Image (cartoon, coloured by chain):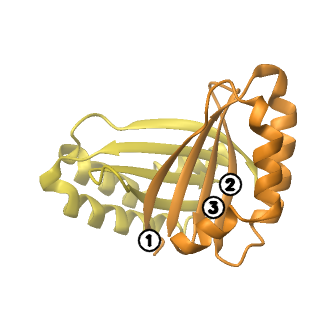
Chain colours: A orange, B yellow
Amino acid sequence: MHVTLVHVHVKPEAVEAFMEACRKNHEQSVREPGNRRFDVLRDAAEPNRFVLYEAYACAEDAAAHKQTDHYRKWRDTVADMMAEPRKGVGYLGLYPA
Amino acid sequence: MHVTLVHVHVKPEAVEAFMEACRKNHEQSVREPGNRRFDVLRDAAEPNRFVLYEAYACAEDAAAHKQTDHYRKWRDTVADMMAEPRKGVGYLGLYPA
């Protein structure tokens, strides 16, 4: 699996709207052919911090996600909600294969 | 979902053995009744760093994992493989519900 953990620090006043935008993105993203996980996580200790756990069968499938309407809508919707630029970290998913 | 991201920095000489121990832990953990994900990730840029993505239906299921033989074997096997203490971060999995 091709995995990205996207760390997002959200402005306090935007947290509810951010979660709603992520819900919509999640619902569409899990329908993409190469998607394996698209989990939206809220930090238990710091509830203005979130992680998107995005796993695709391969790098091409992950790249295709960024061409979708739902990704672009999410990106534009949340652009002004972040307290600092989001940070994506790439991983090779070892298990499951 | 009750989620923990466990960040592990492994000594270079122990990386292969660490991955093998994680493979065995993965194979057993995904069979636990409350398990939703038990993904083993290797950092793409820093290959001695790993993340275990552990998701359970609820906190009780996550706690039960730590009582299993396969968890205890993993814990003891990898104890001397780490370059620094591992760090677990807790999350509430928002989506999927």
Tell me, yes or no, whether dots 2 and 1 are on the same chain. no
Left-right relation of B37 to B23: right
At mark 1, the secondary structure is helix
x and y, in percent, of residue B15 in the image? 21, 57
For label 1, the crowd category at 10 Å Cα-Cα, with few meaning under 14, some 14 to 19 and many 20 or more, is some
Name the residue type under label 3.
Arg
Cβ atoms at labels 3 and 2 below 8 Å apart? no
**Chain of the residue under label 1:** B
The tag on residue A39 is: 2
Q: Residue at x 32, y 55 (%)?
A: B74
Look at discs 3 and 2 and give the one toward the viewer: 2
Q: Tell me where residue A26 appears, x and y as whole percent.
A: 78, 57
**In the image, is residue A88 above or below residue B16?**
above
Marks 2 and 1, Cα distance to the nearest angstrom?
Answer: 21 Å
Residue B27: which disc? 1
Looking at the rendered structure, the kind of residue marked 2 is Asp
Is residue B90 or residue B59 the one in the foreground? B90
Characterize the local packing of mark 3: few (<14), some (14-19) or many (20 or more) Cα atoms within 10 angstroms. Answer: some
Give me the disc on residue B36.
3
Locate residue B34, reporting x and y percent: 64, 59
Q: Foreground: B25 or B83? A: B83
Closer to the camera: disc 2 or disc 1? 2
What's the residue type where badge 1 is placed?
Glu
